[in-house]
Amino acid sequence: MLLLLLGMTPLAAGRAEAVSPIVMTDDTGAAVRLNKPATRIIALYGAFSELLLALDARELLAARTVADAQLPELGHLPAVGTHMRPNAELIVALKPDLVLQLAGRREVLLQTETLRGLGLTVLTFEMDSFEKMFAVLEKLGRLTGRERQAAALLRDWRARLAALRARNAGRKPLRVFYEARYPNLLAAGQASIVNEIIIAAGGENVVSDDKKL
């Protein structure tokens, strides 16, 4: 039914996947080539899992991180460690055709190179702004063969974000402190998507530091 709504037949979709390799460069400059859309994905950061769920691609997720146990759609999946400390042996054993990781800290980049050294296809993306998150959503649409679903989501999310900003324009902002971690206190700084969320919702981040989150 979904394919019919999208104006495609199952046969046509299959042919497109078979003859259209996917070539993509991530935010670190690493390039990968998939001969067909990914069918087994391990996302090592929760936001990627949530974007894939929004794309109705739950069945493509082969594992989750420990933190993603809070997502009811992923609770049944095997855990492969944390974002900062993924278990390489478990990941290799699950035979993913694509691993997603968040760009940023040096420790994460070292883990990424370890996984690539084991023969895994890893793409690393930044998501510290709405525009970067939207770009990742579009790329996930390509990687999973869900370009139309991604385009529809992007139109909807951009419209909702514009409406939210318009509704709060001209209002006195509410000063906000966003606690990202406790008891080792960490707050969201200016160079973060959380800061953009606070501003769009009519707030002002009391933390002036550019620390990303």
Image (spheres, rainbow, N blue to C red):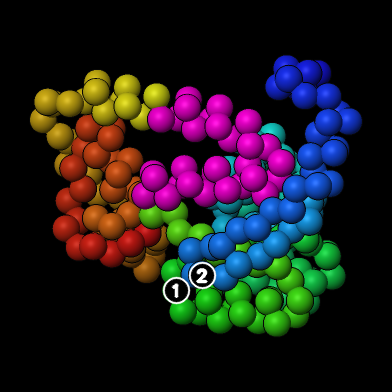
Residue 66: give x, y in percent of width and height.
64, 60
- Amino acid type indicated by mark 2: Gly
**Would residue 86 be visible to someone looking at this image?**
yes
Over which residues does the magenta segment extend? 129-158
Disc 1 + disc 2, Cβ < 8 Å: no
- Amino acid type indicated by mark 1: Arg
| Numbered circle sitting on residue 42 | none
Q: Element at badge 2?
A: loop
Residue 151 placement: quadrant:
top right
Please give the name of the residue rendered at 48% of the width and 47% of the height, measured from the top-left corner.
135
Residue 30: give x, y in percent of width and height.
57, 70
Please give the name of the residue rendered at 54% of the width and 43% of the height, measured from the top-left corner.
137
Residue 159: give x, y in percent of width and height.
39, 24
Residue 147: give x, y in percent of width and height.
63, 37
Tell me the quarter of the image containing the N terminus: top right
Tell me the quarter of the image containing the C terminus: bottom left
Q: Which residue is mark 2?
A: 29
Please give the name of the residue rendered at 61% of the width and 80% of the height, measured from the top-left corner.
113
Q: In the drawing, does residue 130 fall left or right of residue 55?
A: left
Q: Element at badge 1?
A: loop
Q: In the drawing, does residue 123 fall left or right of residue 118?
A: left
Along the viewing direction, whichever of 142 and 173 lies nearer the viewer: 142
Q: Which residue is mark 1?
A: 105
Q: In the drawing, does residue 123 fall left or right of residue 136?
A: right
**Would residue 82 be visible to someone looking at this image?**
no
On whether residue 111 falls in the magenta region, the answer is no
Q: In the drawing, does residue 163 fall left or right of residue 59?
A: left
